[in-house]
């Protein structure tokens, strides 16, 4: 799948040297979760300073002097996903506000399903909002809470929220970390000497040389301060609802999420796909880089050689502008080229992780044929996406989702493939550790872990 | 006086073509009131879009495409003053928020004296603040007001405020304009065909070709919408308290403020200074450009020729950086040079509008002597500044105010002048139209128009 | 006159501390001679480093780190004038090349009349050119010279050039300075402790605290190195031909050029104008700032009070963009506003230094009338410009020169003035020190100091 | 190998629509050959316009308006490699000069061995040089040539050059293309309808949808104009000397260079490596992405599964700055992470294409062990680099080349590997199509295709 539907990534570092720089470094490894904006907020025990930039972590890192001057005792960071509209610095995070309890910053990954409703109520009661982000709602609730201390105020707030959230808060002297009761998005805890590290994925721990301690539990709220880590369970759900799409596509394969190696599960998914939908072929190739692992798994199970038949040009960023006709096709050609020697007169299995609009895949199939492929068999390592996600994944609308509009056979024809098969939801969930009941696969199945109130809008991930 | 202590400027345009461009144009003529940041917000009847930039109006005007795309029915704008610390885009205006009554934008010139107190109270009640600006307090109050309509809500809010404020609000379909009961800062209303124009100074009306209608009255709140202009008096003070410093230094001489030509009064001030502190001399020169008018007045009254003895380099902006020792002296030399032919063997009267730190004046006096002046007589067209301003003028602290630390004779010596005289408060106020009781001259006299609560901090102008 | 036709400015500093910074500082005071690009080249005895930027000196000064790192023993600098077309970094100076004698940098003010011809010849002989600047021709000639040393090679080159040139060369260990035989443009020599300073105008010496030693003589070539200053006369003309326009408009009034105070002569010009073209009036005003001195002279001679009737907004730079109809009028209004109190019911003398296209003056006259002026009498402190300049002044073409197309009476009508008078060439030259025969006034009179070959194009100033 | 030693890439498009845009597009696919600067020059039949930027092709593409306005009939482009020092816009290409024959632009990939000598001679004769690039020498020679037409002048020039060059020239109406007699660097010709395309690698043809016609022959000079393509052989060498490193590392695997698929040869190289240096292991992994193909070849030959054990973070660009101690290690960790599941308790073969300094490989080996690898066997798909390249490859100096300082066993120890083996030069050349004698492998063997004069310096690639 083209990486156009990313999410957000969060980081937190408490204690030790160079907290700001460490957060920025860690954000580099979470960059795949958001390329639109980046920010870091640091406390020096007295005040919280924040710096945000549109674009990649590199943009932030360019502000060498400012980053260096942001010395302190704890720091949090955020990368925000990329989308076409409504992208501006006002929605960048961390968001920092002044409250009766002092300054409070927050970085959020997820989507608060009932945020519009709460916001409407709060506006009625006289609150003002300065962004379009659901995160601002959380800060309002905390500030308003009558609870005697911040821990309780946050707890009080979290119990009012539905939806997905991985939250890292920063005060003058503490970091608070929370994860929704279903554990929809990943969030892990690490340790490096006396330093606590919190991150969306373990690859950030690896980069900093921190060791993985454990996941933040679904429904857990932690406070980290000079006295160490304190934890409470603010809610308890009958089951988990990890986003299975994190295994399929979102997370980096070198990350450990939902207490399991992403690479291992993604490989299993590829194998399961090979079992469910075998095909007689000469070579298995992937749409690089997101489908590499699944393709290797497919190849191993099928006993067909894996090879690199499509080459990706990593120099082509999001900034390419071409006002001429064939924009999309041109963009695909800019990003990918074929290795003719691998394809020539071959029966090719092309493994991709998902189909959203199908546009890229259509052009890739054409390129494979132009490159000499005798047959092209598309194998998708997830079921057709037919339902909206309310938990942070920015799928396009139904009218754009190919699987909502075409049958599998129609899709195959459109893509120009010899065959097209999807991994079934049952088999996908069969690979997930801990059992199908602990995952959310609503985008495939329509079964959401909780009721989605009528009229809930898909808020942007913030 | 070096233009380091500026204030803010506000603009509003309702109706007619190109509202955004007209606001930006108008801001050019208010640039002397603020060089730190600039912004414009425009409604198209449905949504309010805003664009802000750090720096001069030019920075905004550079965003040609965006400005052009901001078509609409009404627009407001703001320039913010320049100061060393705490200058960032978060404090730039107009500030735009979402409220129960829809989007609301505001541009503010002045300083709310009781903002810290209100803010503290609101934070206690659970509000959050995202800037350090007192303007945010106003928006909170309006949003919270239980009044049935926005006019009443704004009125309700304004009556809770002490201090100075010229406010221009923008909603989807209306502009609201308000001025504090003392009329501390100037604010005028103009008309151009069917278009209403509101601006801090009339020079903005001139630039747009709008005719001056009248000043917004002290304590007046206007609503401008498709039905025209509606006005109420939300408060009534026993007298006015126009800032006399606007006549001395702030306002542009070509502006009409407090219902009188600034040039005329500034010239009178110069004449009054000549009457109070005559001196036998050969030439009268000014510190260009802010003291030109007063110097001409002095020369006319004294019957001594006015001439240009100091030349100002307008290419030297605020960005000059010199890490070496004599920074200040170098800066003065970069900005000013002497015309030897005018000074050589002459007894020179140097007219300046005020002394704050005295550093510039010290170097200028030295330059005049180096340029051949036989005598240098400094005449200041205002009394010594010895008290803080709580109404938007960012004087340095007492320890930096030269008049708080040195006697007049000590100051004269430090400056290296042959004589030094200040215009007395009595005579300064004697030039002000409408009588001394209608002006605030607290920075000179210590008499504030209302009680300043213990512990009031000088908030930044916003 | 609107400052749209500027020239270039050159600087050189040999010896002493911070040579690069001193050149940059000096360029600030020469900024009025060129706003398009700026550059500085510095030798550390071994290599020559150069940095150039489009725009004002501020742009260069922004590169704090790089400027600081350019330590060395000698440095030269350049500001280039502003024009609409063909403005790019390739034409910025100093130009630095590698030659058989080592690296050579040059900064040039003036225009080589026979450059196109030499260039054509050299191209025929196999040379390549990388810019459109006549300066490159000079470097080619020097590099090709067979003379045994650089002094002779430069001398050899200079004798082949016709036109105007003030040149400052930099080698690893020396600065060379040269001025054409007519002394068309100003160039002076200063001293500050052991440091030699060369600059287009003395205001740069003042800024650096250097004392004025003398002008570089027409036809003089100096070498400055560790052994001091060595000078030869490479050519000798029967008379000088200083550009009289430098007195009228180009040079800063605080500069001493052609061995006389510019302010003094400009004032004399104003007085001469008053004698030649008196008028009964109430007030004399200038088009600020370039005509201030002449206006004061006029007022003094005529016994009419000088006042400030037009105010200039110095915040309006060259970057203003307005795609709408009345661009020019709008631009004039952005830059100028009237002081009504000075104009109301007054007979006004408006002094300007020259008329090129007349557009600005037309709008200003209208503004004065709108401001209440009863009569507007335009007095121009120079004769009508009717001939091209081949020595570095970028006048528009004949079709755009108002005086080439309209009679004085037609011009007056177009401007909307009650009367219009120009200072005669005879009287203008009568004010010039040293006698009329030592000046070039060809733009007014058509008498050029030397034959201008058929087909000579007006090269840009470089 | 870390991509720090890249070369340049050249493009040319003659005829058809949107020549400038097509060149820019094509440059995207040559980006791997140079990331320091990028430029494009276009003729409209009359004048040649050029635009250059530091950085990636994206920087150029950002100048949307300018690119669009550069309409014309032919265009050439260039990407320049990345290096630490001496990188500035002056050395960016295409270089454009004015000559007796009109404007001439050139883009060059390669290195002229005798450029310093020719330059010295030309400087002696009076020429000036404005860059440090050897390309400027070529332009001088052409401009000076007495030959009656440009074709002959270029031919005349080329016969004087030794070293490697792929040149694309642009005049008002023609493109000239030339390649050195040894054919050291690749250069191909393509066709798209009536449009001629020239490019360093065929992947640029693929991107534009052009079909591959043939390679430009070693010693061939072509002129492309409205009459079609005209070709002469300006020199004839007894054999070819293609750079074998292009197969090993430089060229993109999807390119066809030296008349053979790069992917095919690179895979053969991997297989040959497996035959020469087999090892008992569980998994073969590559240093992504440059060694992927060779690693797959190794795996196929060895019958050991290929897998992805190292993950590369493509968001980490060249801009990363970290002033702290462990810069290099940190940089490696930012770029790579391990997939533990692939490595755990495995005997790992790590295939890399070459070792230059060895620093990256040392950290990678450590990371593999930290990731659980039981054994790490390094296999390098080329021999040790022990000699300088005079043909455009920017190897570090001998003191930095690990193979010049350490024995293989010492290197193995330093890297921390269980075994280390290099492919022998004999076997490497055995894979090259057309026989060993047609290749230059001097960096491994010291046998240069022609005499390298004493004192030849490694010029930068231009």
Image (spheres, coloured by chain):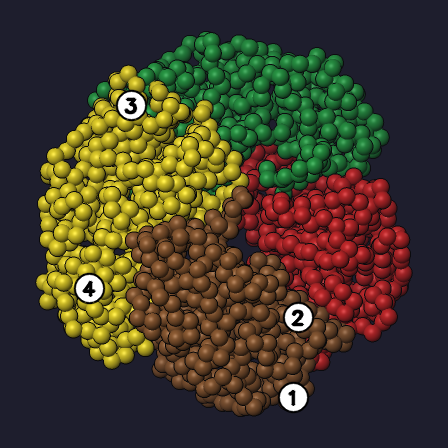
Chain colours: A green, B yellow, C brown, D red
Name the disc covering residue B301, or none.
Answer: 4
Q: Are marks 3 and 1 on the same chain?
A: no
Q: Is residue D111 visible?
A: yes
Name the disc covering residue C457, or none.
Answer: 2
Q: Chain of mark 1?
A: C
Quarter of the C terminus of chain A within the rendering: top left
Q: Is residue D218 above or below residue C393?
A: above
Residue at mark 3 to residue at mark 1: CA–CA distance: 86 Å
Label 4 vs 3, first from the N-terminus: 3
Taking depth in this image into account, of D9 and C272 the one nearest to the observer is: C272
Residue D421 in picture, x, y percent from top left: 68, 49
Residue at mark 4 to residue at mark 2: CA–CA distance: 55 Å
Q: Chain of mark 3?
A: B
Tag 2 and tag 1, C-beta contact below 8 Å: no
Which residue was labeled with disc 1? C147
Label 2 vs 1, first from the N-terminus: 1
Tag 1 and tag 4, C-beta contact below 8 Å: no
Residue at mark 2 to residue at mark 1: CA–CA distance: 30 Å
Name the disc covering residue B151, or none.
Answer: 3
């Amino acid at each position: 799948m083209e990486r156009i539907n990313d999410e957000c990534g969060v980081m937190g570092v408490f204690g030790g040297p160079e907290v700001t720089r460490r957060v920025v470094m860690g954000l580099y490894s979470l960059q795949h979760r958001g390329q639109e904006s980046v920010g870091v907020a640091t406390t020096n025990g007295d005040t919280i300073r924040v710096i945000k930039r549109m674009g990649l972590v590199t943009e932030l890192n360019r502000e060498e002097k400012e980053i260096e001057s942001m010395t302190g005792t704890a720091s949090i960071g955020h990368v925000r996903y990329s989308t076409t509209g409504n992208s501006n610095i006002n929605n960048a995070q961390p968001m920092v506000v002044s409250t009766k309890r002092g300054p409070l910053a927050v970085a959020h990954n997820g989507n608060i399903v009932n945020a519009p409703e709460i916001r409407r109520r709060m506006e009625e009661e006289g609150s003002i909002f300065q962004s379009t982000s659901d995160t601002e709602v959380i800060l309002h609730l905390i500030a308003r809470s009558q609870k005697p201390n911040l821990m309780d105020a946050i707890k009080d707030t979290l119990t009012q929220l539905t939806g997905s959230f991985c939250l890292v808060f920063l005060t003058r002297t503490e970091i608070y970390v929370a994860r929704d009761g279903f554990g929809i998005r990943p969030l892990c805890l690490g340790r490096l000497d006396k330093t606590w590290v919190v991150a969306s994925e373990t690859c950030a721990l690896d980069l900093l040389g921190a060791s993985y301690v454990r996941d933040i539990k679904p429904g857990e709220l932690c406070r980290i301060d000079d006295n160490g880590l304190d934890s409470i369970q603010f809610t308890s759900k009958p089951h988990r609802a990890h986003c299975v799409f994190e295994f399929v596509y979102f997370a980096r394969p070198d990350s450990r999420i939902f207490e399991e190696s992403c690479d291992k599960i993604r490989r299993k998914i590829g194998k399961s796909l090979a079992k469910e939908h075998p095909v007689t072929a000469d070579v298995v190739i992937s749409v690089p880089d997101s489908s590499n692992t699944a393709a290797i798994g497919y190849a191993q199970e099928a006993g067909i050689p894996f090879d690199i038949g499509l080459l990706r040009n990593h120099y082509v960023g999001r900034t390419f502008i071409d006002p001429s006709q064939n924009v999309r096709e041109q963009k695909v050609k800019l990003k990918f080229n074929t290795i003719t020697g691998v394809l020539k007169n071959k029966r090719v299995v092309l493994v991709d992780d998902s189909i959203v609009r199908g546009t890229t895949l259509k052009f890739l199939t054409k390129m494979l044929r132009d490159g000499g492929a005798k047959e092209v068999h598309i194998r998708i390592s997830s079921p057709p996406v037919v339902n909206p996600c309310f938990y942070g994944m920015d799928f396009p609308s139904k009218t754009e989702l190919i699987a909502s509009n075409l049958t599998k056979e129609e899709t195959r024809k459109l893509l120009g493939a010899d065959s097209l098969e999807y991994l079934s939801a049952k088999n996908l969930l069969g690979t997930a550790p801990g059992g199908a009941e602990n995952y959310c696969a609503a985008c495939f199945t329509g079964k959401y872990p909780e009721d989605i109130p009528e009229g809930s809008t898909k808020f942007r991930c913030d």
